[in-house]
Amino acid sequence: MLNVGVIGLGSMGMTHLDAYSRLPDVRVVAVADQKFATPGATVGRAGNIAGQSSGGFDLDSVKKYVEAIELINDPEVQAVDICAPTSSHKELALLAIKAGKSVFVEKPLARTSTDAREIAEAAAKAGVVLMPAHCMRFWPGWDWLKAAMNDKRFGAVQSASFVRLGSKPPTPFYNDGVASGGSHLDLHIHDTDFVLFLFGMPDAVTSFGRIGESGAVEHTVTRYHFGDTDALVTSEGAWTRDAEKRPFEMRYTVVFERATVVYNLGADPVMRVYQADKEPEAVLLSSDLGYALEVAEFARCAAARQNSPVVNGIDGYRALEIIEAELRSIETGQTFYL
Ligand SMILES: NC(=O)c1ccc[n+]([C@@H]2O[C@H](COP(=O)([O-])OP(=O)(O)OC[C@H]3O[C@@H](n4cnc5c(N)ncnc54)[C@H](O)[C@@H]3O)[C@@H](O)[C@H]2O)c1
């Protein structure tokens, strides 16, 4: 049995609690949120994806701390799951690593690539498990794409386009672009990381962006350049101002030599493969969300005291290095070479 403590009970904290509650070998023993200092304050809120949290986790069954450090130092807690705002990730992750706990950190691993690298190096030195929560690597249909690229069943990729557009989250942390990094860090990093997962580190990026009310980039369009492929790889990510009235958009179109694969969260079926000599083919996807699958992977890794082969601390700071290169390109109006 693995004993877990979850810090930060906003949309992601509740999503992770929901996922842990379905794992037979995991027990959530404690949660921490500063809101517990205010009697009657409510924790939790809805996220972008339908069904990501039932909100059914029984908070009365676990210890509740106001200060995260109390949870980290609780001897019963073996694994710490950090779902607090991005600006707190570095401090909390380093404390958990120092306490010898396995650590799961919501994306982005930290506010900057330098801080993320410090976390990854501290975890490696301490010999503790560290996993950044880059959920797209586990998402049904996205893991399928990775497998199709690896086994080259449709030949080489000629172009890949990723799009992610969602309403700006309502909590105050996101309004502060310095703390949150805008949609560039909140949302666009999912596709930046997935491009890293599929193609490795790009040689250069050409990005365009728009600064929003938070003071940070709230709309990003990027082309990623690679030395070993001339595939046209692009992504677009933005916060929209429609107060969640428009459905969250998450899609990709990947053109292979012998097939085109389309994933569109809002379509039915969500995923289709198009080939010249066949009828369009729907891909049957698992009903599990990537969140549940990544949480299960973290629990497995923490119990085995081994880092995940799918995503590790190095991926966490590499994704941020690309994100920061995209920002430099937006600022200078020039292609940025990594
Ligand atoms: N993987 C994804 O798809 C995804 C989606 C949304 C957010 N996120 C990431 O998850 C993290 C949290 O985002 P959210 O949308 O759930 O935030 P949120 O604003 O909904 O909730 C954050 C919670 O953390 C609490 N908190 C703040 N500081 C704390 C501290 N020091 N100790 C304990 N609790 C603290 C707040 O009271 C609040 O309840 C961010 O890093 C964000 O980038 C990931």
Image: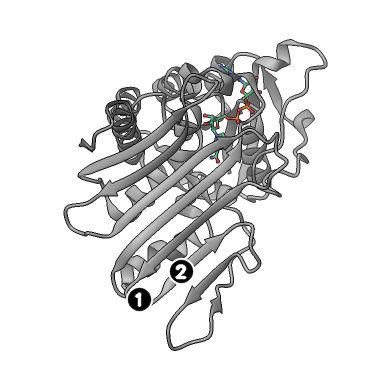
On the rendered structure, is 144 left or right of 334? right
Q: Residue furthest right?
A: 40
* Vertical side of 40 occupied by 262: above or below: below
On the rendered structure, is 303 left or right of 154? right
Answer with the quarter of the image where residue 149 lies.
bottom left
How is this picture coloured? one colour
Answer with the quarter of the image where residue 102 lies.
top left
Provide the secondary structure element on which disc 2 rests.
Answer: strand
Q: Residues within 10 Å of mark 1 (few under 14, many from 20)?
A: some
Q: Quadrant of ligand 1?
A: top right
Task: Using the image, tell me which numbered label, if any, was put on residue 261.
Answer: 2
Provide the secondary structure element on which disc 1 rests.
Answer: loop
Q: Nearer the viewer, residue 199 or 252?
A: 252
Q: Residue at x 40, y 75 (%)?
A: 259
Tag 1 residue: 154
Place of residue 90 in the rendered image (x, y in percent of width and height, measured from the top left): 42, 21
Q: Residue at x 64, y 61 (%)?
A: 287
Place of residue 169 in the rendered image (x, y in percent of width and height, measured from the top left): 63, 30
Marks 2 & 1, CB-CB < 8 Å contact: yes
Q: Residue furthest bottom?
A: 277
First-in-chain label (2 vs 1)? 1
Place of residue 226 in the rendered image (x, y in percent of width and height, measured from the top left): 22, 51
On the rendered structure, is 303 left or right of 25? left
Going by the numbered disc 1, the residue's amino acid type is: Phe
Query: Taking the image as drawn, is residue 41 in sight?
Result: yes
